[in-house]
Image: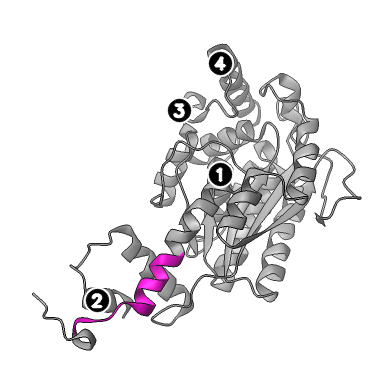
Amino acid sequence: MAEQHQDRLTKPRGSLGELEAVSVQLAGLAGVDPPPLPEPAVVAVFAADHGVHAHGVSPWPQEVTAQMAANLSTGGAVVNALAAQNGARVVVVDVGVAADLSTLDLLHRKVAPGTADLLTAPAMTREQAVAAIEVGIDVAEQLVADGAGCLLTGDMGIANTTASAALVAALLGLPAEEVTGRGTGIDDAALAHKTSVVRRSLELHRPDPGDPLAVLAAVGGLEHAALAGFVLAGSALRVPVVLDGVIAGAAALVAGALHPYALVACLAGHRSAEPGHARALAALGLRPLIDLDLRLGEGSGAVLALPLVQCAARVLREVATFDSAGVSDK
């Protein structure tokens, strides 16, 4: 019905490109044409630390995760500014920061104070991975119960692009060299080292992509697990979920491997500069709405794409048809 509606609008058929597909997806999710506007929007920023940081895969000290969680909670981060511009609310969730954040105004859902070093042991136990997935599910359910009409993924965690590369490589059967990127801007020598860390982690654990929970526990992060749960819940609740960059892409791969309908609500906000993100999007069959070489995280790319998602719904809701406007069709 929504596809036919698009074809009757006063414009050349297909002239809005990908936005037409987005509008149809939104109508399908809502089960009504035209779909409701995907608002209000909430960005959930899941914060966690990574034991693999000990191997020098990032030039940033680990305490930056906690410092940025504080900055996010007080409105001082980039995603806060972007969200304010686009009418979205930011919610910060401590799912695994290696510091005491009890005095901060955020959601306290810590499963563990960061992951273990994935070069010496599984990053998480299976039970921790499940608990973090449940955090993401609970947060999504609560946000929707409070009225959210669109969910956006965010993340904060120093060294999380290393875990993301390992997840993408393991789940898609790709070599470390194809999916490991520069993260926050490392040089060639540091990139070679980071790639080696990803490769060695895969050689150590030999995770089976047929058991996505085991892959997640072996080389993933607590925020990856929470984001996977967030995606699962969004799809179950039939609320659009706009994905951010490579961390969200890796988490979406996990979610898709856990349930065949996990991605029905997902929209790719952007394609990040991380090579693993392009591989993940291709595997997920998602087309990014913007491509600006972003590599920040926090949910920044998802928030920048939010107006496009909202415009897609508004077109179906407000543009006249050829019949109603008295305009001749070709």
Q: Secondary structure at mark 3?
A: helix
- Measure how far apart labels 2 and 4 are at the Cα level: 50 Å
x, y percentage for residue 81?
62, 50
x, y percentage for residue 274?
50, 33
Which amino acid is tagged 2?
Leu
Q: Residues within 10 Å of mark 3 (few under 14, many from 20)?
A: some
Dominant SS in magenta:
helix
The residue identified by callout 1 is 250
x, y percentage for residue 57?
66, 22
Question: Which of the marked residues, 2 or 4, is nearer the chain's N terminus?
Answer: 2
* 268 sits left or right of 135 in the view: left
Q: Residues within 10 Å of mark 1 (few under 14, many from 20)?
A: many
- Measure how far apart labels 3 and 1 are at the Cα level: 14 Å
Which region of the structure is painted magenta? Answer: 310-322
x, y percentage for residue 197?
63, 22
Of circles 1 and 4, the one toward us is 4
Which amino acid is tagged 3?
Glu
Q: Secondary structure at mark 2?
A: loop
Of circles 2 and 4, the one toward us is 2
Residue depicted at 41% across the width and 71% down the height = 313
Classify residue 78 by image quadrant: top right
Which amino acid is tagged 1?
Ala
Label disc, if present, on residue 187 of the rendered structure: 4
Q: Secondary structure at mark 4?
A: loop
* 316 sits left or right of 246 in the view: left
11 inside magenta stretch: no
- Quarter of the rendering occupied by the C terminus: bottom left
Residue depicted at 70% across the width and 50% down the height = 46
